[in-house]
């Protein structure tokens, strides 16, 4: 092997390792949900299938061939479950629940795809056997900018997932009572706001109700988003919700009413010169602890009574009176 080829292989290896290091650093301790892809459940594999549909944490990507995995079977991802069990899973078995695994896994899989497109089993095989032109092609593909990681499920995504379950539960309940389309639409709305009141349920209550109603599997993505929101805790979503209400009033004066208390407006509608009093929910959004504290401050209040202990405070968030 000539010197130029040896240097090219060494340089390509260094670049590939640096790419993996940067990608993994951004995904350290990423939260995932494991779903077994194989239907057969052998006793020898109990450590794997007994954790089906459970949450886990990323330990590291598995990119080097070994006695356990040939390079043709890679890449894999070593994960750790909450009971301490560690296994190697594959990308299609893992659902990204905090937004950090997807960018990292895309980078890893891109490297393997690039090597295989050039006729190799994977990056290790390519770095050992490839000529300079193949090494250059591999570098060109693997050094493309990666997608930006998301720090956590956005509050909007959580709200959308929550609304999906609310609508699905209400429709399921209505369908069990009535088949007439017009009547079903009316009944669905009643199940959302009244009767059972799905819109007033907590995330945990919605998830359990979805399981009980046998609709969870049909809304797997929404369920995964909400389960992740609960599982990660800390600076992620809490049970505190911001509900925006619309109060409709008819009046014949030029007051903008923004400085009036809600109770005063209700009294004016009931006993005074105003007409109205219709109260409608516009939106409900789950909040992180930081968001809850910010909203409470904006309302001239303190949100700490929502959090009687510090269980939901993230590890990197200083406690009251502690060292910043």
Image (cartoon, rainbow, N blue to C red):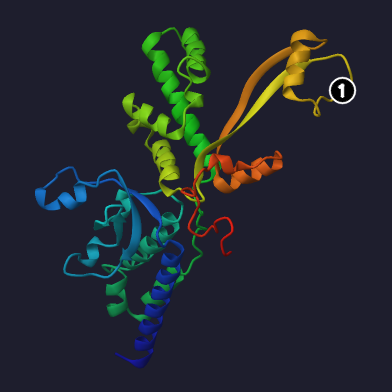
Q: Is residue 90 left or right of residue 177?
A: left
Q: Is residue 279 left or right of residue 135?
A: right
Q: Position of residue 188 (x, y in %)?
A: 48, 16
Residue drawn where x is 35% and y is 86% of the image? 5
Q: Position of residue 166 (x, y in %)?
A: 46, 26
Q: Nearer the viewer, residue 71 or 214?
A: 214
Q: How many marks?
A: 1
Q: Nearer the viewer, residue 187 or 9?
A: 187
Q: Position of residue 113 (x, y in %)?
A: 35, 62
* 140 is higher (above) or lower (below) than 155: below
* 303 is higher (above) or lower (below) than 114: above
Local packing at callout 1 (Cα closer than 10 Å; few below 14, some 14-19, many 20+) is few
Q: Quadrant of residue 214?
A: top left
Residue drawn where x is 45% and y is 58% of the image? 103
Q: Secondary structure at mark 1?
A: loop
Q: Quadrant of residue 60?
A: bottom left
Q: Position of residue 189 (x, y in %)?
A: 52, 16
Residue drawn where x is 39% and y is 32% of the image? 207
Identify the residue position indicated by label 1 in the image: 255
Residue 214 visible? The answer is no
Q: Quadrant of residue 221?
A: top left
Q: Quadrant of the N terminus?
A: bottom left
Residue drawn where x is 46% and y is 63% of the image? 26
Q: Nearer the viewer, residue 207 or 27?
A: 207
Residue 274 visible? The answer is yes
Q: Is residue 188 left or right of residue 36?
A: right
Extreme-bottom residue of the structure? 3
């Amino acid at each position: 092997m000539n010197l130029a080829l040896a240097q090219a292989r060494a340089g390509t290896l260094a670049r590939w390792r640096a790419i993996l290091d940067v990608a993994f650093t951004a995904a350290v301790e990423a939260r995932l949900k494991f779903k077994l892809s194989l239907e057969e459940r052998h006793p020898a594999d109990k450590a794997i299938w007994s954790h089906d549909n459970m949450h886990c944490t990323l330990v590291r990507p598995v990119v080097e061939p070994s006695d356990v995995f040939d390079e043709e079977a890679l890449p894999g991802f070593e994960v750790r479950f909450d009971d301490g069990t560690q296994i190697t899973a594959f990308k299609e078995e893992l659902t990204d629940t905090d937004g950090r695994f997807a960018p990292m896994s895309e980078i890893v899989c891109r490297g393997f795809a690039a090597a295989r497109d050039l006729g190799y089993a994977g990056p290790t095989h390519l770095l050992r056997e490839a000529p300079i032109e193949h090494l250059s092609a591999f570098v060109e593909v693997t050094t493309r900018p990666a997608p930006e990681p998301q720090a956590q499920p956005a509050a909007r995504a959580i709200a959308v997932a929550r609304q999906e379950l609310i609508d699905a539960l209400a429709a399921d309940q209505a369908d069990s009572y009535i088949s007439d389309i017009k009547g079903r639409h009316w009944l669905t709305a009643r199940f959302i706001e009244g009767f059972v009141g799905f819109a007033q349920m907590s995330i945990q209550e919605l998830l359990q109700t979805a399981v009980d109603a046998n609709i969870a599997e049909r809304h797997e993505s929404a369920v995964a988003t909400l389960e992740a929101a609960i599982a990660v805790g800390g600076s992620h979503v809490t049970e505190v919700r911001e509900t925006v209400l619309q109060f409709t009033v008819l009046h014949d004066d030029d007051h903008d009413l923004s400085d009036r208390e809600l109770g005063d407006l209700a009294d004016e509608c009931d006993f005074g010169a105003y007409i109205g009093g219709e109260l409608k929910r516009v939106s409900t959004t789950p909040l992180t602890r930081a968001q809850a504290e910010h909203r409470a401050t904006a309302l001239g209040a303190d949100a700490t009574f929502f959090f009687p202990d510090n269980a939901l405070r993230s590890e990197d968030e200083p406690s009251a009176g502690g060292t910043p």
